[in-house]
Image (spheres, rainbow, N blue to C red):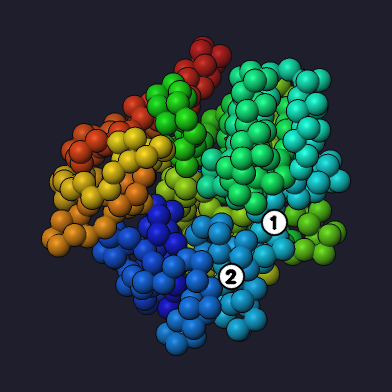
Amino acid sequence: MRVLVVGSGGREHVLTWKLRQSPRVQKVYCAPGNAGIAQEAECVPIAAEDIDALVAFARQEKIDLTVVGPEAPLTLGIVDAFTAAGLAIFGPMQEAARLEGSKVFAKQLMEKYKIPTAESRSFTNVEEALTYLQEKEAPIVVKADGLAAGKGVVVAATLAEAEDAVRRMLVEEEFGAAGSRIIIEEYLQGEEVTILAFTDGETIIPMVSSQDHKAAYDGDKGPNTGGMGAYSPAPVLTKELLAQVEREILQPTILGLRAEGITYKGVLYAGLMITENGPKVLEYNVRFGDPECQVILPPLKTDLCTIMLAVINGTLAKTQIEWHDNHTVCVVMASGGYPLSYQKGKVITGLDEAAMLQDVYVFHAGTAKEGNQLVTSGGRVLGVTAWGDKLTDALDKAYQAVEIINFAGAHYRHDIGQKALRHQIMNCSFRA
Ligand code: AMP
Ligand code: GLY
């Protein structure tokens, strides 16, 4: 089979890497890709949102399967366009992608189908939003309705901060149209966990759990980022809790959409808070997470290409999905200054040495080739990924590789996976 991966980050690198391992796959293209992806696939200079050009390319190159990484083309209707052209593509249709494209849409679905989530209200009028805030207490959360590259959520520690966020979104239009409608929602306390599931709109198969590290600095301090690292599995999601998540969240989401006339196919991403009152939805995404994908796909035993075709063909019920029983960690190395402003073009060294380490793989997120040198070209630069029988083994190997790799201004979190280690210590002392 000939496969096309759409996107250019760490998620698309791991998708390319995994699909290349499939005995069914002969050739992988990536549009537009990055310098790391170029080492294992043929990169084509077409932007992920240029749907017409992607359809034309897929037709011309007789692509058998297209896999979409990021949300933007999904919300723009790439799956509808490929399907109309008779081309097989993995991901939800435009209408289903609204689950990520509009937080108001997602909230309405959750309310209607009694899916546990934070209590909230939506506003377009600034005065009404500010009056509502007067009745509330901090901390409180303000969210832009539309896509804002992970920056449209403000967890406000004070009401003044919340008011400021409301004004920035509704009056100053900091997020443009994405922030012309906002949600004000209850602050949920607990530990976060991500659960992704493959679904063909009928059958839902959860993947191994994972935990992202959204804050820029150690100890969950600093501004939110796209994700500074991840690990899998996440011990906070026990077997019992996973069963509850399937029953109370994943199934009613997919069945609720069906009742609305929407068949959801692809990956459903549920960002959850495990609260005192059980798991609640923080957000849905309609694609693999980044960097969650980097820790979820390495331990996948079953052929990814086969799973994706089963999703597209609606035969997931007949597909067994198996995972290795190990631990995976991804430490993101970012450009100095990220997620605020940062410089590009810094030379990256040490990748060849890091590649010699066992059970380590460095996925590229924001890299480019300049002559013979590899340079930084984005905020998140590399996803240094490692696996092992124990979480501590995986962490040791990942950080060993991080120590070897260098670029000016590189910053990364030193505490990836620490929450999981705390759970492990607690479980041991309970058993003792
Ligand atoms: P979202 O993009 O909606 O997942 O929000 C980004 C991050 O903001 C989440 O990963 C949480 O850390 C935090 N967050 C979002 N909503 C809430 C909430 N209701 N209570 C507490 N934290 C939240
Ligand atoms: N890591 C969070 C996301 O992919 O949205």
Q: Is residue 209 visible?
A: no
Q: Which mark is residue 118?
A: none
Residue 266, image x, y percentages: 61, 61
Could you say whether the residue bearing mark 2 is in a helix, strand or loop?
helix
Ligand 1 under 8 Å from disc 1 Cβ? no
Q: Residue drawn 57% across and 67% down?
A: 90
What residue is shown with label 2? 78
Number of residues whose C-alpha sits closer than 10 Å to that of mark 2, classed few (under 14), some (14–19) or many (20 or more)? many
- Is the C-beta of the residue carrying label 2 under 8 Å from the nearest atom of ligand 2? no
Say left or right for 52 vs 199.
left
* Of pointers 2 and 1, the one earlier in the residue sequence: 2
The residue sitting at 40% across, 59% down in the picture is 8
Q: Label 2, label 1: how many angstroms apart (C-alpha)? A: 13 Å
Using a 10 Å C-alpha cutoff, classify the residue at mark 1 as few (fewer than 14 neighbours), some (14 to 19) or many (20 or more): many
Relative side of 181 to 6, left or right:
right
Q: In which quarter of the view is residue 279 placed?
A: top right
From the image, tell me which residue sits under label 1.
Answer: 98
Residue extending furthest left? 372
Residue 218: image x %, image y %?
A: 40, 24
Q: Amino acid at mark 1?
A: Arg
Mark 1 secondary-structure assignment? helix
Which one is in front, 156 or 315? Answer: 156
- The image shows residue 269 at horizontal and vertical percentages of 61, 48
Q: Amino acid at mark 2?
A: Ile
- Decide if residue 407 is in sight here: yes
